[in-house]
Amino acid sequence: MPSPKVILSGGGTGGHIFPAIAIANAIKNLEPNAEILFVGAQGRMEMEKVPAAGYPIEGLWISGFQRSLSLKNLMFPFKVIKSLQAAKKIIEKFNPDLVIGTGGYASGPVLRIATKKKIPTLIQEQNSYAGITNKILGKSVNKVCVAFENMERFFPADKIVLTGNPVRKTVIEIEGKRNKACEFFGLHKGKKTILIIGGSLGAKAINEAILPQINRFIEEDVQLIWQAGKVSFETVEAGTKHLKNKGIKVHQFIAEMDLAYAAADLVISRAGAIAVTEIVLTKKPAILVPLPSAAEDHQTKNAIALTQHDAALLISNSQAANLLTEQALNLVQNDEELSKLAHNISPFGLPNSAEVIAKEALKLIAL
């Protein structure tokens, strides 16, 4: 095969960007001379994260349609037209052999133009409930890579390949790291430890449920690794700084997520696709608190995909303040229940997803 030229498009959130970068890296591993170009949305986080990963990116003037009444919606049709025109120019100039979309605003115009030009196309859907952009694109692309079963509700069955979600290997390689992790975070390796994560911004409902109950964790001799996020960090840190020496370790952001997972006996998390995938692949018992405002409530559907198999617990956002601390403390002290959840979550793990998706994509060029 001559050196392939590939466009990857997706963004708006880390859940769309990091899978795209993982797929790009896998393509480069398989085809070192591959030429790769990203297309994202101007002003969104991909315009920073993609160049940091070593890839060029072009930006489209595009944003999502607001579900509430908003003056921004008046601009939406104009942005779509401009983005389609810009995507057409980018594709004609770069002349790709293959176009891959991972969801988000920018992938719509790019994949739309690519399918019209009969360029081989693939989309990757991270969630158990497909996003609107991917649902529309699924009718015309060549291949749809999914992370959950029963996605025939959204896509033609003959196009679907169950691949799982690409995640950074460095995050999920936790075997034999518990001692190192406890040392890194300043924790006692003989005590139960809960990891709280809510994304880079943090999870307001989780933070506000835990903070007023913080003394209960001290009383029960349970340690916390707490990624409070950008929004709540100062409040959480101020409310816990006197407890640092008692195993309450608060961070705005945790870069060393492999060590955080390695130290954890239980994870409390939102239910975004990538967070769920990391929890599954590290085989960690989890309490999931889905973000209700996520598009089409897909986080709740991600959580239900696990809870219906007794592979995780689900607490709704509105019930977090009343139930989260109590359930977390009961669960983390129950070794039998922790083992059951870890056992039940194991079958959901699909390793090497990025490589599998890259191979599926490259197969389309050879057709």
Image (cartoon, grey):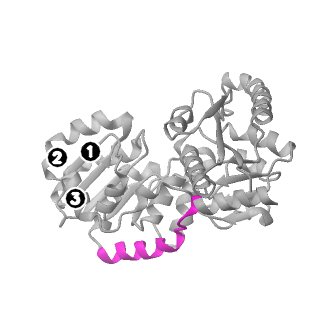
Q: Is residue 44 left or right of residue 313?
A: right
Q: Secondary structure at mark 2?
A: helix
Please name the predominant secondary structure of the magenta segment in the image: helix
Quarter holding the C terminus is bottom right
Task: Name the residue at 81% across, 39% down.
Answer: 113
Mark 3 vs 2, N-terminal side: 3
Q: Quadrant of residue 179?
A: bottom left
Residue 287, picture quadrant: bottom left
- Name the disc covering residue 302, or none: none
Q: Quadrant of the N terminus?
A: bottom right
- Quarter of the rendering containing residue 148: bottom right
Q: Is residue 327 visible?
A: no
In the rendered image, residue 151, in percent from the top left (x then y), is placed at: 70, 63
The nearer-to-camera label among 3 and 1 is: 3
Dot 1 falls on a residue whose secondary structure is strand
Region of the chain picked out in magenta, as a range: 335-354
348 or 351: nearer the eye? 351
The number of numbered discs placed on residues in the rendered structure image is 3
Q: Is residue 168 above or below residue 330?
A: above
Q: Residues within 10 Å of mark 3 (few under 14, many from 20)?
A: many
Give the mark, 2 or 1, whose residue is nearer the N terminus: 2
What element does badge 3 sit on? helix
Looking at the picture, which amino acid does disc 3 mark?
Cys
Name the residue type under label 2: Lys
Q: Identify the residue at horizontal 56%, vertical 58% (top origin).
A: 302
Question: Which is more toward the observer, 54 or 339?
Answer: 54
Is residue 351 a member of the stretch shown in magenta? yes
Residue for badge 3: 182
